[in-house]
Image (tube, rainbow, N blue to C red):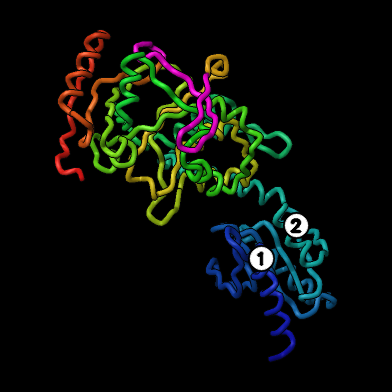
Amino acid sequence: MNDFVLQRQETINRFLDSCLGKNPFSVSPNVRWHAESISEFDLLISYKTIILAVVEITQSLHDTNTLEKAKQQITHAFHILNCHFGIISDNSDYYICETNNNEYHKYGFDNVVHYIINHQFVHDLIYKQNFTNISNVLNGNKLDSFVERLQKIDGRFSFSENDETNFWQKLLKQEGKGITTIYRYTSLDTVLSILSTNKYRMYGIVGMNDKSEIDYFDDYCNSTKNTLLYPILNNLFLSSCSLLKDDLTMWRLYGDNAKGVCLSFDIKPHFSNNFILQAISYADDNGQDDKLDIIKDLLKTNVVFSDIDKWKHFFKAKDYSIEKEVRLLFQDKDSVKKRDWIKSNDNSIINPFVEFDLLGTEFPLELKEIILGPKCPEKETNRYQLIELIHQNNLQINVEVSTIKNYR
């Protein structure tokens, strides 16, 4: 094997082993291109399916004729490949130019890679490609105006307040579309408290039982967990419900081991915009989360989400999909004035909570039915007592007993 063949392969290996050879970039050696005629290129560098650069490998750049012949090949590549960069190398020196400028600059290998990766053309290309991904997720529609209006300041992109809300709603809109009724599994003590006070309690996010739920979004998107966000998180309150009525698994997990109740809530057509009522988006069977892939790409492209710490709670791993969860989230900058505090029995975290009048217009849910669990003690007696309490408080709520007969 002669020296030039070894030199050529070493140049190819350098590019393959660099960050340009790693996803989402790729390096393809020895490419035959069919256009007006068949052309052969030593190396193509691509971002996903878009060709960024062509590399022409020569024996020696000190020979003027060899260098000029290589430049002609680069010009030909610009014409038929529509790539942006041309690179000429003899494995010692590297010359790079751009399609709109025939001026070649000499760099070392690492500087050539840095030049491409950090070039504004590549940044803009990645940005546009990410928007194409957004379009695919948003049902293949054209880019929505709220995405096109992203504001660029100091290399970072941000939404206006309304546009960001529209973006998250559009991203999640297929989850639980057309929901009219949701179900919450809880204890007999809790329903007694609700009926006695006509108050529905929502607890702060900080005290959530399973920390893996909170970390899922950050871990998947490689975003930074910031413990300094407690002032924000202490103003977010969450309540978890399900699309499943009188379900055995849900009784076991959340209905006091079937000794509690299942509350059936109708969703009001109009309620305060301080609430978000949204079905959870789950990853697929392979752990892939297409929606979060979009968020991850946008974060890499310096897109800033002001409300990410609010919307991140509507994404979960596939392991939880059996629950068919719907979450109600409340945020109000004035809520700090009316919150109270409690120590969680599950994890001993001191946690804020807020309460809402079930008969008021602000709260999104209307309690329509109570189902006593399969193992609820004294089912018939407790059913009668709940009916009495409901009648005493002038409420319109049906009370039934679970249809599950064989719970062990």
Residue 362 place in picture, x, y as percent: 41, 14
Sequence-wise first label, 1 or 2: 1
Write the start and end of the magenta stretch as one range: 340-362
Label for residue 30?
none
Q: Is residue 192 above or below residue 30?
A: above
- Tell me where residue 187 appears, x and y as whole percent: 32, 30
Task: Please tell me whether mark 1 or mark 2 is closer to you in this view.
Answer: 2
Q: Is residue 278 left or right of residue 147?
A: left
Of 237 and 17, nearer the camera is 237
* Residue 98 appears in the rendering: yes
Residue type at mark 2? Answer: Tyr
> Residue 115: which numbered mark, if any?
2
Q: Position of residue 193 (x, y in %)?
A: 35, 19
Q: Residue at left 78%, top 61%? A: 111
Label 2: state its secondary structure: helix
Graded by Cα atoms within 10 Å as few (under 14), some (14 to 19) or many (20 or more), the crowding at tag 1 reads many
Q: Position of residue 299 (x, y in %)?
A: 60, 43
- The residue under label 1 is 54
